[in-house]
Amino acid sequence: MATIKDVAREADVSIATVSRIMNNRGAISDKTRKKVYEAMERLHYQPNEMARALQKNKSNIIGLVVPKIDYAFFSRLTDAVEESCHNFGYKLMICKSDENEEREKELVSMLQANQVDGILLCSRLGDTQIYSENMLPLISIDREVEGFSSVTSDNYSGGMKAARELFEAGSRYPLILGTEIPEYMYMDQRYRGFFEECEKKGMKCTELRIKQQNLSQDELVFEFLRVMEKNPGIDGMFMTGDIIAAKIVCHKKIRETGILERMPYIGYDGLEISQLLDITTVSQPIYEIGECAVELLIKKISGKLVQERSILPVRLIERESTLKFKQKKDSEIK
Amino acid sequence: MATIKDVAREADVSIATVSRIMNNRGAISDKTRKKVYEAMERLHYQPNEMARALQKNKSNIIGLVVPKIDYAFFSRLTDAVEESCHNFGYKLMICKSDENEEREKELVSMLQANQVDGILLCSRLGDTQIYSENMLPLISIDREVEGFSSVTSDNYSGGMKAARELFEAGSRYPLILGTEIPEYMYMDQRYRGFFEECEKKGMKCTELRIKQQNLSQDELVFEFLRVMEKNPGIDGMFMTGDIIAAKIVCHKKIRETGILERMPYIGYDGLEISQLLDITTVSQPIYEIGECAVELLIKKISGKLVQERSILPVRLIERESTLKFKQKKDSEIK
DNA sequence: CTGAAAGCGCTAACAT
DNA sequence: ATGTTAGCGCTTTCAG
């Protein structure tokens, strides 16, 4: 690979001149400029971005840490983040923690050692104290990390919307089906919002929480059917993620029971699969979450003060899984 | 951030000694080593990987270029690639070309300028000649790029398996439904394999190719229904991707026609959604494709010679969508 | 066993 | 308008 020296020699100027031309600094005669450009062409010169980064103490690289890349939520988020980075002239170094706490910590310090200008973190750490000593710009997504700004969507309101929709579809004894989730995740608010709205509406709800690990479809379905049997009064269902909703809705055993025909149900996230399956869902603006996180991080990198919390709105997407019950109600009224 | 100089001063040794200790080079007295380690601790020292990379002319970064990150195939691939990179001590810089030819080219040279040690490329370029001048190690995934090694799965055999499965499920006039795809993609072999096996079995097939852009579910379904109407003899279907299969299988209008109950169908890729929907599919070893590509790239980076083409096996996963017809046939025989 | 010094490719004063 | 030089943080001869 040709270096700045090679170009300088080829164009018969000093390296400073070449550098000035690359960076559009200071005054350069047209003749010299032309000579240098030609030399660059001839040598297929590309400036070494690492050397530049070293010298300017700025890499224009952003690090992203997610638990998994191939979970629909995170792949969408990653896509959004890369798009925004690209728009702002940043490169993206991606890492997955694989939901492993040790690995997550290592990744953050690895990114630091690699001189990324800032980090976007979807942490799964119990205690995020450790990051507080860290002075590098960092934005947390979907949870609080003490001392850093965070971006998320309005989980509380999302939970409320879900409850209200079920209510309107006639449900009074809904089931809420989701994973066990630590309180420090903003997602926990999704449950709170749901519960509180239920209370307000006088709905009484049953709760089924499964461990993240037990997500095998069959086990999930088994647990679900057990709960349904125990609580025959259940007349609606809020599943706190579209993936889990898809697993329930698609399962043969469940279809055979006909349960789903008899009650409204609703998912969460707004993933493509909810559309395919025609499931009402609370849609998170995943793309905008990624965009917002990148923008905040870049602001922070350039030394500006940024908002401590950014909460983006969610919206309900009504589909068959609740609509048919609302219509039934409407026509009953008539 | 503390530098090697700070550590040297703190430990009262030369920077050379610190460097030697970091790299486990040469002989160091226990006393000195201890002193230096303690100084590192105290200063929270982390070596600057950019500086190291500059000096060693090796960044330990791999670049990955994909058309989209949030398409299930590519998010799974990206996950696999990051996992392998991590295992080999490499970092991953990810870029999406957004299916844009210009952007793809820019990304490749951007990665080069950033001193990645090698590139993994899922190209969508009509003419990949341009890369041939490029001397940086590069592995192509799912298509040929002249002058570089490629990794893919056995599309031809996958197409054959699909045809054979439909045949065994009783189909004689199958429809093949897929996107328009340039010949230079290995995926084209999927069609060839299917056609040739059909011929061998004496099946006669109808073809419906939609433009990548027209993937709106409704349009797709409209086209599909039109073809079915025109060709009432169709008695089986091969959809060349699981996503498109899901779009067909889930669509209300199609469900209502009952078409799907009357004939076997099969998807391709082995994505999670095919399992949820109980669709027989030809499963690609996406994870292994990623792994293999990384391994080859690293071999290449270390100057070794690597195989020009790696073709990984695919396997048929039988599910309800064909099984129920095979069983019917079986029982008819009895 | 340890240190001094050159150099990786580049930028940014400081000269001229 | 252009060149000289120091230095970014590190590794690696070469001396001692």
Image (cartoon, coloured by chain):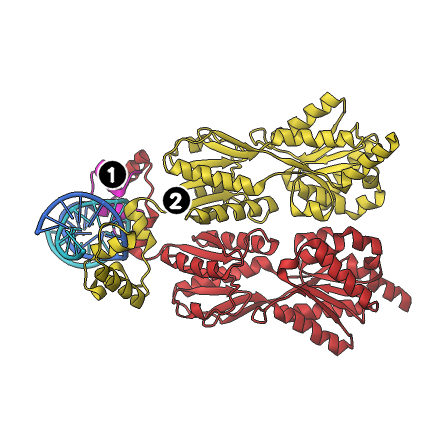
Chain colours: A yellow, B red, C blue, D cyan
**In the image, residue B93 above or below residue A34:** above
Note whether residue B24 is visible: no
Residue A330 left/right relative to B220: right
Q: How many marks?
A: 2
Residue sitting nearer the eye, A124 or C8: C8
- Quadrant in which residue A169 is drawn: top right
Residue B158 left/right relative to B301: right
Q: Residue at x 22, y 52 (%)?
A: A27
The chain carrying label 2 is A
Note whether residue B63 is visible: yes
Q: Amino acid at mark 2?
A: Val
Q: Amino acid at mark 1?
A: Asp
Residue sitting nearer the eye, B267 or B248: B248
Q: Quadrant of the N terminus of chain A?
A: bottom left
Q: Residue at x 62, y 59 (%)?
A: B213
Q: What numbered label is drawn on residue B179?
A: none
Q: What numbered label is drawn on residue A116?
A: 2
**Magenta stretch, residue numbers:** B1-30
The chain carrying label 1 is B
- Quadrant in which residue B117 is drawn: bottom left
> Looking at the image, which residue sits at the far front?
A30
Residue beneath label 1, please? B6
Could you say where residue A280 lies in the image, as x and y percent from the top left? 72, 40
- Quadrant in which residue D2 is drawn: bottom left
**In the image, residue B93 above or below residue A109:** below
